[in-house]
Image: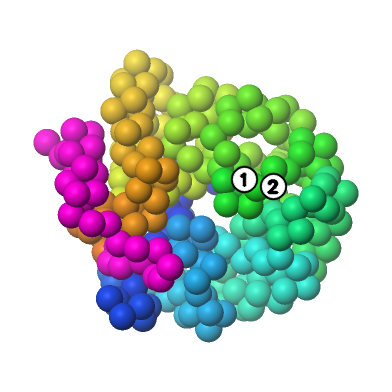
């Protein structure tokens, strides 16, 4: 698998007010992203509210993504579950639908036992039995588990484990992963907050929640940096930083979906137990977005 270059949105899953999946809105987003500066699509990731989706819904979203995505772009699936067996089963079902690689969440439920040995055992079995290349997904804010550099160093040398998304925003840790991993292994950041430092360290790809609503600004940050326009890249990074903080931290997925709606995509509703933003929150997030994006 070739190394990824560019921006990948972890696609939101629009829901109707009654909680049903809104597949028409989902396809509408794909068609809009097809015209944006992105490298591919991550379907059924964290920002897809994947933990609230049935397997049938997950597979339907994968099918729709394969059907409607621009054909020269990568299709990645977030197929990680807490057991190796179920992860392999879901990953290979997604592969049969046309997914090209799998982003696999670190197992976390029995957290105290999820040490480096467990991570190596889990990812090795998944990669040995997956029909598509595997990437590690490290996101401690959701899992309360942080994969160790020793595990990354060993797993990066597996022929079917081709990279990782590190969403912790910990720049020193990102630098450590880059240092210990095999040169063929691609370390990507999973948050715009670390994008500029990651570019400075040679990272070429990002999977960021903000790419759902502001993919082109993220892409231009990279374009400017790689063109040697370092000051302009940093200025754009700084301007967009508050938007990222709003849609990945303060307002969560509901905030991300609202900004999608505000900027011409289809976020729609979240699924219970998440709650949509109230009017005060909407006003607050609009002010942040208007300052950064709308002119």
Relative to 96, say whether 105 is above or below: above
Q: Which residues are magenta?
A: 267-295
Relative to 98, say whether 150 is above or below: above
- Residue at (53, 29) in percent of width and height: 198
Q: So how many labels did they put on this image? A: 2
Where is residue 77? Give x, y as percent. 56, 64
Where is residue 200? Give x, y as percent. 52, 22
Q: Earlier in the sequence, mark 1 or mark 2?
A: 1
Q: How is the image coloured?
A: rainbow
- Which corner quadrant of the image does residue 15 belong to? bottom left
Where is residue 75? Give x, y as percent. 51, 62
For disc 2, the marked residue is: 145
For disc 1, the marked residue is: 140
What's the mark number on residue 93? none
**CB contact under 8 Å: marks 1 and 2:** yes
Where is residue 248? Give x, y as percent. 42, 45
Left or right, 207 with respect to 158, comes to left
Q: Nearer the viewer, residue 43 or 224?
A: 43
Q: Is residue 213 magenta?
A: no
- Residue at (51, 67) in percent of width and height: 50
């Amino acid at each position: 698998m070739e190394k990824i270059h560019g921006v990948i949105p972890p696609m939101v899953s629009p829901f109707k007010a009654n909680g049903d999946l809104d597949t028409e809105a989902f396809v509408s987003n794909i068609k809009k992203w097809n015209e944006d500066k992105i490298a591919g699509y991550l379907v059924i990731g964290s920002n897809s509210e994947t933990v609230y989706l049935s397997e049938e819904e997950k597979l339907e979203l994968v099918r729709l993504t394969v059907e409607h995505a621009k054909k020269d772009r990568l299709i990645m699936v977030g197929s990680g579950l807490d057991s190796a067996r179920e992860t392999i089963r879901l990953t290979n079902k997604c592969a049969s639908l046309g997914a090209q690689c799998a982003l696999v969440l670190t197992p976390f439920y029995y957290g105290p036992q999820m040490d480096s040995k467990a991570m190596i055992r889990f990812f090795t079995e998944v990669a040995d039995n997956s029909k598509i290349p595997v990437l590690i997904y490290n996101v401690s804010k959701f899992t309360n588990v942080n994969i160790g550099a020793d595990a990354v160093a060993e797993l990066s040398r597996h022929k079917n484990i081709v990279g990782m998304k590190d969403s912790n925003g910990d720049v020193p840790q990102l630098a450590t992963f880059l240092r210990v991993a095999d040169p063929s292994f691609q370390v990507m950041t999973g948050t715009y907050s670390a994008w500029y430092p990651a570019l400075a360290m040679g990272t070429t790809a990002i999977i960021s929640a903000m790419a759902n609503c502001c993919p082109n600004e993220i892409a231009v940050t990279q374009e400017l940096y790689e063109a040697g326009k370092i000051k302009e890249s940093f200025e754009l990074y700084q301007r967009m930083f508050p938007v990222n903080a709003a849609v990945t931290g303060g307002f969560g997925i509901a905030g991300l979906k609202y900004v999608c709606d505000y900027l011409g995509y289809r976020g729609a509703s979240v699924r219970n137990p998440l709650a949509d933003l109230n009017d005060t929150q909407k006003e607050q997030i609009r002010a942040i977005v208007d300052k950064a994006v709308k002119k």
